[in-house]
Amino acid sequence: MKSKKEYPQDFKTMFGLSTMGLMSVAGASFMTSLFMLYLTDYAGIGAMAAVLGTVLLLVGRIVDAVDDPLQGWIMDSARITKIGKYKPFCFISTITILISIIALYNIPSAVVQKPALIVLWVVLFYLVYDIGISFYAAEPLKQTLTDDVNVRAKMAMWPRIIGMLGAMPFAFFLAMTTGLNQRIGDMNRSFSLMAIILIVPIALLSLLGTVLVKEGKYSHVETEKRAKLSMKDIFDMLKTNEPLKAQFLAVLFSGFIWTMVFATATYYVKWAYCADLTTGAIDSGKFALLTTVMGAMQMLPLLIGAFIAPVIIKKLGDPLRTTKLSMVLSVIIGVVFFLMKIVGLLELSPALYFIMLFLQLLATGINFVPAMNIWLECMDYGVYKTGKTTSALVDAMRKFLEKGQTALSSAMVGGILIAIGYQVDSVTDTYVGDLAAIPGMLNWFMVVSALLPALLALVAYLIYRFRYPITPEIREEMALELAKRKADAPQE
């Protein structure tokens, strides 16, 4: 008879951890691969769309430079409530993201008619989304549940797998929208309606998952007299947390890999394999089919990577070694992918593009679980060195990188689109710009999605190889010390 697993590996906690982040995954899916496409092709706002999207994404990162650390400080400084320190912020995050996504993908017709109102509407709700995603405090919450590396790997694996399954509809979003449009006859309305159909049930499931998770204990004393974090504490964290410095620097490079791929893939498939470059017309049936295949080639490798990563971690005995393996594979596959474009192999068949896309995302998919373990390790190290919780601040740095990389990848695409005067009729989905510029656009897309990621993965590997300071011995010592502090510390 199977013994019942204890907290935090019990079914209730694992189910909650696996579903509470679905809203964050959905938001990232909308903002990574669909937001710029919606603005440029389907929002009906004309030639200004590429400029608006590109400028907005870049300005948003400037705001994040102040906003993310501030929100991290707010969460770390919060008192422990009856449901925990970080859990309330997860509720706030889900609701805020829901509101912003519905608004961004349903721009009222009265707003569309006035450029100033378009800018105001999009900027406002993009900032609402940005604030919401920064308040998603799942990683600081997980850090309180256990110090065990293998358990943490499972706590990263299952949310990743469920998150990828939850993201499946977004991989097939354009195919479903095209099907809906056969009844509606307006891609703008079909896109907006499909966004609502998907986002509302995901929000409800995320709220349920958050309810089910019980926040864990802390490695320090929390009392009403405990002083809140000061700016000195923040600077001390940045000064003393050597693992965080190395991880931040490595992810500054490696985090671009999948965002660059997702930002360019839909555009590449649409104009490389589905367009008549003499008329600008799109074969909607073929586009629906290929985006469905592309969705599978994007989701399956990430799922497989999440499944096998804990096995690789256990085999290699170290999350860091697994991450370095992922970087090496990313370098090799990215270079091969780019060379296939240069010699003209990708033009022969979309199948070759999809195979390489699968391999590229499998290599980066292997890295998700160990990378999250390393971030949690950086949180542990901060408490270990200072005795104060700065977990949300550490996580804020991770989120700042993620959002910045998503935005900059989309901005690179936006820059390419601006350069060629990209413009699509939002109702008929026909290109109305200079068709002669499309082949050059496709070449630049492959630079962004294959060559640059390979170079960035190489730099990240070198940083992990020579800069990351935590050895297996230090990891074990740190875990024992934090476990002792949790056992000794009174909890509210």
Image (tube, grey):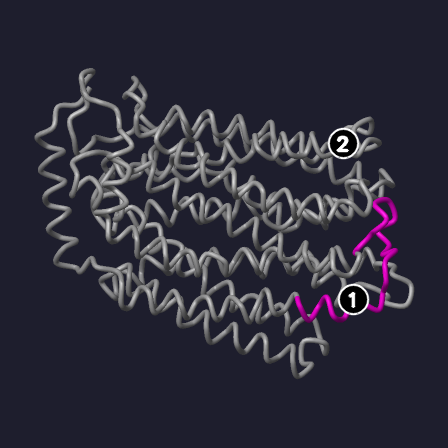
Crowdedness of circle 1 by 10 Å Cα count: few (<14), some, many (20+)? some
Is 442 in the magenta? yes
Mark 2 or mark 1: name the one nearer the start of the chain.
2
Is 491 situated above or below 135? above
- Residue visible at 79% across and 34% down in the picture: 115
The amino acid type, in three-letter code, at marker 2 is Ala
Report the label total. Answer: 2
Residue 13: image location, x then y, percent: 33, 34
How far across and how far down the image is residue 213, in percent? Answer: 35, 30
On the picture, is 189 further left or further right than 390? right
> What is the three-letter code of the residue carrying label 1?
Ile
Q: SS for tag 1?
A: helix
Would you say 314 lies left or right of 458 here?
Answer: left
Q: Residues within 10 Å of mark 2 (few under 14, many from 20)?
A: few
Residue drawn at x 32%, y 21% as measured from the top left = 83
Secondary structure category for the residue under label 2: helix
10 or 295: nearer the eye?
Answer: 295
Question: Image quadrant for the C terminus?
Answer: top left
- In depth, the one of 242 and 81 nearer the eye is 242
Figure check: 286 above or below 136: below
Q: Is residue 147 above or below residue 286?
A: above
In the image, is residue 300 part of the stretch drawn in magenta? no
**Contact, CB < 8 Å: mark 2 with mark 1?**
no
* In this view, 166 is above or below 440: above
What label does residue 438 carry, if any? 1
**Going by the picture, which residue comes out furthest to the bottom?**
343
Q: Position of residue 247 (x, y in %)?
A: 33, 55
Image point (25%, 39%), residue name: 5
Disc number for residue 116: 2
Where does the magenta region start and end? 422-444
Q: Is residue 104 left or right of residue 281?
A: left
The image quadrant of residue 292 is: bottom right
